[in-house]
Image (spheres, coloured by chain):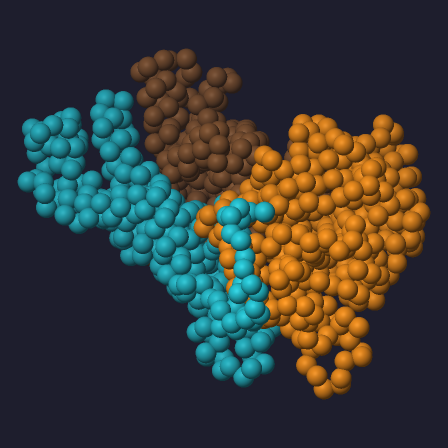
Chain colours: A orange, B brown, C cyan
Amino acid sequence: MSMGNILEVKNLHVSFKSYAGTVKAVRGVDFVLGPQQTLAMVGESGCGKTVTAKSILRLFGRTSGEISKDSSILFHDEELLNLNKRKLSEIRGGKISMIFQDSMTSLNPTMRVGKQIAECIRLHNKISREEAMKKACDLLRLVEIPNPEERLKNFPHQMSGGMRQRVMIAMALSCNPEVLIADEPTTALDVTIQAQLIDLLRSLRERMGMSVILVTHDLGVVADFADYIQVMYAGQIVERGTKEEIFKDPKHPYTWALLDSIPNRSQPRKSRLYSLKGTPPNLLLPIEGCPFAARCRYCMPVCKKQAPTETSFSDSHRVNCWLNHPMAPKDVRKGGGAQ
Amino acid sequence: MARFIIKRVFYMILVLWIVTTITFFLVHSIPGDPVSAMVQDLPEETRELYLEQYGFDQPKIVQYIRFMKQLLQGDLGSSLRYPGRKVAEIASSFAPVSAQIGGIALAIGFTVGTILGIIAALNRNRFSDRVIMILALLGTTIPTFVTASLLQYVFTVVCPIFPTTGWGGAEHMVLPVACMCVGPLATYARYMRSSVLDTTSQDYVLTAEAKGARTPRIVMFHIFRNSFLPCLTVLCTSVASIFSGSFIVEKIFAIPGLGTYFISAINDRDYSMILGLNIIFTGIYILSVLVTDILLGVLDPRIRLAEKN
Amino acid sequence: MENTKSYVPCQEDFVIIGCDDAATEQMPPVSLTYWQHSFRRFKSNKVALVSAVVLLLIVVMTIVGPLMSPYDMEVVDLSQRNLWPSATYWFGTDQLGRDLFSRVWEGGRVSIIIGLLGSLIVALVGCIYGGVSAYFGGRVDNLMMRVVEILSSVPHLLVVIMMSIVLDSSSVGTLLFAMCITGWCPVARLVRSQMLQISRSEYVMAAKVMGVKPLTSIMTHFIPNTLSIIIVNITFRIPGFIFGEAFLSYVGLGVQPPATSWGALCSAASLNFLFYPYQLIIPAGLIALTMLCFTLIGDGLRDALDPKLRR
């Protein structure tokens, strides 16, 4: 991989303790993030994408999330997992910041939004309250909120969902972070607002020159926004590549399934939209073989016996699937989106 | 805000009037007349004299109108048992004593209770949490009169540092206050713990963490206020429990407060005294509910806004 | 990779077999109903289980306890006054020489009956009132809730005291009546708000849209979803009634002799507590233990019945 990566995640394992046992939510994830790149993590709910994103800042709240000892997350070659609480809090919100899915519950209901933004600024910069407020006002203007001076004094419940998410973005950008982690930033919003927010995020990314990790299950958003895509399934990355590689030449049956379930105008009118059957494997249990085997249309005996290894197609495009083994049948994909 | 307060005050007066009326007719519906209920073997003539003097021979409605007229002038009637003793006078001279003990006990219970609750919640399932919660559980399950008797026993027999009865200096207050703050303290500790645990699992706490705020700051600015508000609503109910606590505690420690008078009025079946004190207690209770309401309105922006619209 | 077994795949392994549709729709092996789940969770809570056992013991003792002692609770024996607990008098005797062992359990019977019956009555009245209020809604609801509001603006204890004075008979029935007369208000509020919340929820809307009859909806949605909350509420209310009775007896408004209760026993014992502390400690300890058990069982039930509240 090229030098000068901002973020390098190696062999990340995350588990949660529950009454039923230990849930292994992330099972060995590796990836790198270069400067000014946008990396999208996609996959259905419960595939470990949000947990991976939250592990970077070790944000598990009150849940029992635990990162295994041999995992490594390097930020400018500095191990984030070894940082003490003080150092970590300097990174959080300063160098790496995060926006969450639900803007209604992610803002403190009893604190004015201006103060919430100013709090973030003052946590990382030694400036006066007034200056911080002025900067918060500039940030609200930056995220295109009309009447920023008035809006500073609002409480979260006085704003609309899109507006609140803009406040979240303003807060996340307040200290010029190098990496912005956006965890399903548009999922809770309606479609027109989604598009506006994605436009805003894109222009801000360009203007501030930051890298973005986008967690989403919406491939439409990804197509608009991402440089690199990694598809996750059952806590593992099953396929990764540039946007073009994933959309034009996907290699993993799960990626095919994801792409086929997007409505497409070129499809025959009366054909049914494809939907992937079944549910992801139970993460409480160890997984034998390929985790996707049980739901895979192209499952082979080997898939149930042993986990596939990674096959590279280019520097960026790598796939974990037995179909790419020399002995496997070629060009098995029926119909659908490769054209 | 002003409109909200005025509305609440009017409502409070209405409720107080309804309660007074109901109480009045309840007391006056007691079978037999109040005088013979109080003293059984009174000569017939003396009894009638009494009845006339207090106006008990008149129709109920006349008595009621007279009572309400007096009430509007701040006169709550006078004791049957000790003629000449005005209820209002007794109340104004002994209420401060009760208020002092009750107020201090509530203040200590509330502050210490909430702090312990926060500590317990932040150390969930650790040793300190377990200890605090077990103590709080015991605090809510041991009746006040048991605590009072135990304290009296300890400080009379084992180590007589504080006086165990009577009323005077600050040293007389220690034991009754200690006794009375146990209940609220335990209740608040339990309540605050669950409220804080509720808040800690909210997303905005995670946001604060993602901003780079550290634990003390998150607790102070994000958790405390949001978990304190629901606790405040319980405050008014504990004002009521301060009364019930004070009845017994005042009696056991022989403190000349309203509670002692109330209990002796009950034992004497001194109806006018019971009626008067009842109105006073209810008034204080409703007032405290009103104050909590206003306080909540000031502190919680969501309520403030709902009222405005 | 996780799987490090040294397995060398051969050509036969690379034939597409596709997926088995039935296998993909795997259901969890055992499917338990809500109540079975709750019962399991409750059973796994040791503290609550121990409390339940202790409580059961206390209840059994209040039934068989008086029979175990050779002395009748009402027999006065002035030659045996204020005796400390011994082999003959297991809990000692009181100032009139009555056997405390049988008195304590007889008294416990009254206290526990008041606790159980009181909270049941309150729950029943509260459910009906709250349910009716929520069902009719609009003006009826508004009026009914105003009544509740006014009734609950008087401190509960004052109402109880007033009612006991007015009724002036101090039997268990009147005591219960006095304690229940406004005691149902909080339950009514709870039930009403719960009902409203359920009727606004999407699954009830969905049921309505699908043409489910109101009665079926009430049986399958409203009652199960309210019942758990009410059960927990009843458990938490029982200590309040036992406490209330103890308070009234202590003030002199509770059960009158020859009947007795834990509160009345405490009240009688507190006069010469300094000399005969056992007379107070035994009934007071039992009150505290019973309340503790009910509170812990309540905690356990809350956790078991409402997994969302689990912590």
| Residue drawn at 45 percent across, 78 percent down | C216
Q: Nearer the viewer, residue A145 or C286?
A: A145
Quick check: C87 above or below A288? Answer: above
Q: Residue at x 45, y 73 (%)?
A: C220
Write the residue at 79% across / 33% down.
Answer: A76
**Horizontal arrangement in the rendering, residue C137 relative to residue C275 (left or right):** right
Instruction: Check the image and report above or below for C273 versus A152.
Output: above
The mark tally for this picture is 0
In depth, the one of B21 and A166 nearer the eye is A166
Q: Height in image: B18 above or below A93?
A: below
In this picture, residue B33 sits left or right of residue A82: left
Which residue is at the far bottom?
A: A270
Residue B43 in the image: state x and y as whole percent.
28, 45
Please state the horizontal and vertical placement of residue A266, each as a whole percent of the image. Answer: 80, 79
Residue B298 visible in the current orientation = no
Name the one closer to the observer, A80 or B48: A80
Q: Could one spot residue A191 in this view of the protein?
A: yes
**Quadrant in which residue A303 is drawn:** bottom right
Image position, residue B183 (x, y; %): 45, 35
Name the spot of residue A233 as percent of width and height, x first: 63, 57
Q: For the point 24% across and 33% down, which residue is it?
A: C282
